[in-house]
Image (cartoon, grey):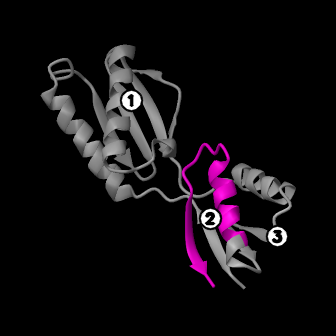
């Protein structure tokens, strides 16, 4: 019975490369050089520090540009609320999404069942396992899920016949 898995994994090495690119641009740009602007990564979170709101939005743009150049989907970033930090600066925590969250898994499951496709979806932790009788049905399911407006990047792996 053909099957595949739906996962959401962000390549942390590419995230590191994008963060290093942002750090390099911070030191080179005349409007950001010599400021308290910084981006640090630890585990699945980024911490952005900026002098003011304008510089914070510039760092957001730099992050998105570097993520795009590294072919990492910017939807994987979940920007938190900016809060005041020491020295009249702003700090913002950005979480990097890993794994399909339960709410999105239920949404996908409900939408596929509602479309009357002949595939079965089972939720296994932070992954979804999709199986069906024919390969064409699975390909239709992938196309249907790609058309959905998901706020998280999804990958389709382990396609088996």
Quadrant into which the N terminus falls: bottom right
Residue 27: x and y in percent read 15, 30
Q: What stretch is highlighted in magenta?
A: 137-161
- Contact (Cβ within 8 Å) of mark 1 with mark 2: no
Q: Which of marks 3 and 1 is nearer the N terminus?
A: 1
Which residue is at 62% across, 64% downward? 6
On screen, residue 136 above or below 142: below
Question: Quick one: label 1, few (<14), some, or many (20+) residues within 10 Å?
Answer: some
Between 24 and 110, the residue placed more toward the observer is 110
Residue 113, quarter of picture: bottom right
For label 2, the residue is 6
Residue 60 has which mark? 1
Between 143 and 91, the residue placed more toward the observer is 143
Label 3, label 2: how far apart the Cα atoms are: 17 Å
Helix, strand or loop at label 1? It is helix
Question: Quick one: label 3, few (<14), some, or many (20+) residues within 10 Å?
Answer: some
On screen, residue 10 above or below 40: below
Residue 44: x and y in percent read 46, 51
Residue 71: x and y in percent read 37, 51
The extreme front residue here reads 136
Between 32 and 120, the residue placed more toward the observer is 120
């Amino acid at each position: 019975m053909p099957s595949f898995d739906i996962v959401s994994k962000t390549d942390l090495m590419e995230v590191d490369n994008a963060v290093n690119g942002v750090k390099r641009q911070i030191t080179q740009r005349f409007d950001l050089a010599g400021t308290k602007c910084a981006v640090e990564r630890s585990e699945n979170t980024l911490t952005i520090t900026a002098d003011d709101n304008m510089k914070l939005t510039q760092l957001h743009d730099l992050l998105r540009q570097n993520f795009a150049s590294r072919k990492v989907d910017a939807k994987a970033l979940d920007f938190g609320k900016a809060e005041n930090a020491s020295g009249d600066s702003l700090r913002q925590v950005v979480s990097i999404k890993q794994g399909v969250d339960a709410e999105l898994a239920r949404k996908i499951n409900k939408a596929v069942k509602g479309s009357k496709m002949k595939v079965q979806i089972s939720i296994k932790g932070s992954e979804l396992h999709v199986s069906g009788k024919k390969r064409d049905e699975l390909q239709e399911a992938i196309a249907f899920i790609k058309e959905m407006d998901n706020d998280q990047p999804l990958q389709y792996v382990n396609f088996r016949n």
